[in-house]
Amino acid sequence: MSEAGGRRIKRSLLIDAGSVHFLDEEEIARMSSSLVLHDYLAGKAGEVSRFNVGLGEAGRYALNQQRLTNLGTLRAYAVSYLAALPGIRKDMTLLVRQLDARGEGIPLELYCFTQTTDWYEYEGIVSDIFDHMFAVLPEFGLRLYQKPAGGDLRDIPLELYCFTQTTDWYEYEGIVSDIFDHMIAVLPEFGLRLYQKPAGGDLRDAIAAAAVREAGSAVARP
C-alpha cells in the first residue's frame, strides 16, 4: 500500500460470546462519563428511549424493546479511538465491524490505514492499538476469547438471510453489526447461548466443579 501513502491494518479482536450483554442504566451512566462515548451514548439512549416509548404498553416487555449492547458500544468506542489517533489516516477507510462467529469467539475487526508505510513504525502503531483494546475490554464487561487445548463440541447454525436497503459498504457493515449485536445479546431471553469452543475461564470453572463433585463423592463413599 506504499503507493497510496498508507499501510493497512486489518486485524480482529476475538470477543468471548458469553460476555456480550445488554447495558443496564448503571453501565450507561458510567460509560457516559467517557469523553469518547458521551455523545454516542446520549444520542443512542435518546433514540432507543423514543422507540420504546412509542411502543406504548408493549414497550414494557423486554423482547419488544430496543436496547444498547456492550459489544455495539465497544464498536463505537473503537471507531472514535482510531479516528483520534494521529498515526491513522482519516482520508482512507476506517471501519470497525463484526465478522461471522465461527465457534472461536466473535471477531471484531479493526480496518484502517496508518500514516506511515515504514514497517517498524507500522508494527509499533498496531501493537499500541491492540494493547489498548485488550486492556479496555473489562470496562465494557467484555472478555477476550481464548481457546484451550482439546475439546470438540457441535454447533447448530441459524442463518439470517435478508437484504439491506443500502448498498453503501459503511452503512451495510453498521447494519449487519447492529443486527448481530442485538441477536447475540438477546439469546439469554430464550435460554440460548452462542456456541463457541470452551474459553480458558470456562475450562477452569469446569475443572473446579468436577473436583468439587469428586471430593463430595469421595466423602460419601463408605
Image: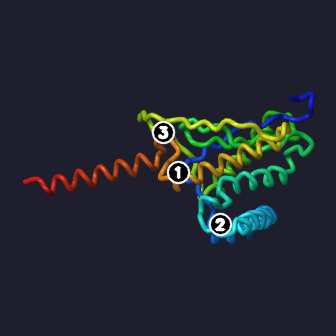
Between 185 and 102, the one lying in front of the other is 185
Return the disc, 2 or 3, that comes first in the chain's sequence. 2
212 to the left or right of 129: left
Mark 2 Cα shell of 10 Å, populated few (<14), some (14-19), many (≥20): some
Query: Residue tagged by mark 3?
Result: 197
Q: Are marks 2 and 3 in contact (CB under 8 Å)?
A: no
In-front residue for pair 144/54: 54
Q: Quadrant of residue 76?
A: bottom right
**Mark 2 and mark 1: Cα distance apart in space:** 26 Å
Badge 1 marks a residue whose secondary structure is: helix
**Mark 1 highlights which residue?**
18
Residue type, label 3: Lys
Q: Are marks 2 and 1 in contact (CB under 8 Å)?
A: no
Q: Amino acid type of disc 2? A: Gly
Report helix, strand or loop for mark 3.
loop
x 72%, y 43%: residue: 176
Task: Give residue 189's position: percent from left, percent from top.
Answer: 53, 56
Mark 1 nearby-residue class (10 Å; few <14, some 14–19, many ≥20):
many
